[in-house]
Amino acid sequence: MGGRYALALFDLASDEKQVAAVEADLKSLKKALAESQDLRTLVSSPAFNAEDKGKALVAIAVKAKFSMTTIKFLGLLATNGRAGLLASIITSYEALSAKARGAVSAQVTTAIALSPAQSKGVAAALRQALGKDPEIETRVDPAILGGIKVQVGSRLFDASLKSKLDSLKFALKRA
């Protein structure tokens, strides 16, 4: 369902030549969702009605100086009772925008933050493997213990220490 809303927003933004502006707005909103438990609760909780969600999302968008296209879309999304799909819509929109630019989106997860040199190395390796310029989103997840996980679309390359230990544990159980 989120993909359909993302496609509709992308088509509208394309018609209005606002694709980059809307994408920047959505990236800001994605960051806010990741950082704010209150915002995640607002969009996902049935305790808030569609009108309240719409007012809150529009107020946030206006305060953040989002484009009018984004503001109207957020209001419509809440009115239709689909605010809970916001994270999915943002992800789908980013993929559509990257595809239109000929870029590939990659999510890189490490146990500790990458240095600038390491980030360049990962970008170079992905560029060589994919044949396209990657747009890298990095995440830090101490739970993977070490190594790296790279997700490009539906493909996942998992060279994390946690997955290697899990594999070893499974192999030992079977022996």
Image (tube, rainbow, N blue to C red):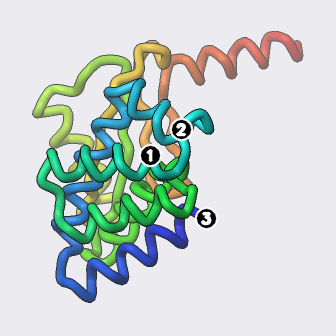
The answer to whether mark 3 and mark 1 are in CB contact below 8 A is no
- The residue singled out by tag 1 in the image is 53
The answer to whether mark 2 and mark 1 are in CB contact below 8 A is yes
Q: Tell me which numbered mark, 3 or 1, is placed earlier along the sequence.
A: 3
In the figure, is residue 135 to the left or right of 169? left
Q: Secondary structure at mark 3?
A: loop
Q: Secondary structure at mark 2?
A: loop
Q: Nearer the viewer, mark 3 or mark 1?
A: 1
Q: Tell me which numbered mark, 2 or 1, is placed earlier along the sequence.
A: 2
Foreground residue among 93 and 146: 93
Question: Given the image, on which type of amino acid does mark 1 rest?
Answer: Lys
Q: Is residue 40 above or below residue 15?
A: above
Question: Please, which residue is most extreme toward the bottom here?
Answer: 15
- The residue singled out by tag 2 in the image is 48
**Quadrant location, the C terminus:** top right
- Say which residue appears at 41% left-offset and 21% top-offset: 141
Residue 69 found in image quarter: bottom left
Q: Position of residue 70 (x, y in %)?
A: 27, 64
Q: Tell me which numbered mark, 3 or 2, is placed earlier along the sequence.
A: 3
In the figure, is residue 56 to the left or right of 81? left
Question: Given the image, on which type of amino acid does mark 2 rest?
Answer: Phe
Q: Position of residue 17 (x, y in %)?
A: 18, 82
Foreground residue among 111 and 46: 46
Tell me, yes or no, if residue 131 can be seen here.
Answer: no
Tell me, yes or no, if residue 5 can be seen here.
Answer: yes
Instruction: Kindly report the distance in space between the C-alpha atoms of the residues bearing marks 3 and 1.
Output: 19 Å
Q: Is residue 56 above or below residue 174?
A: below
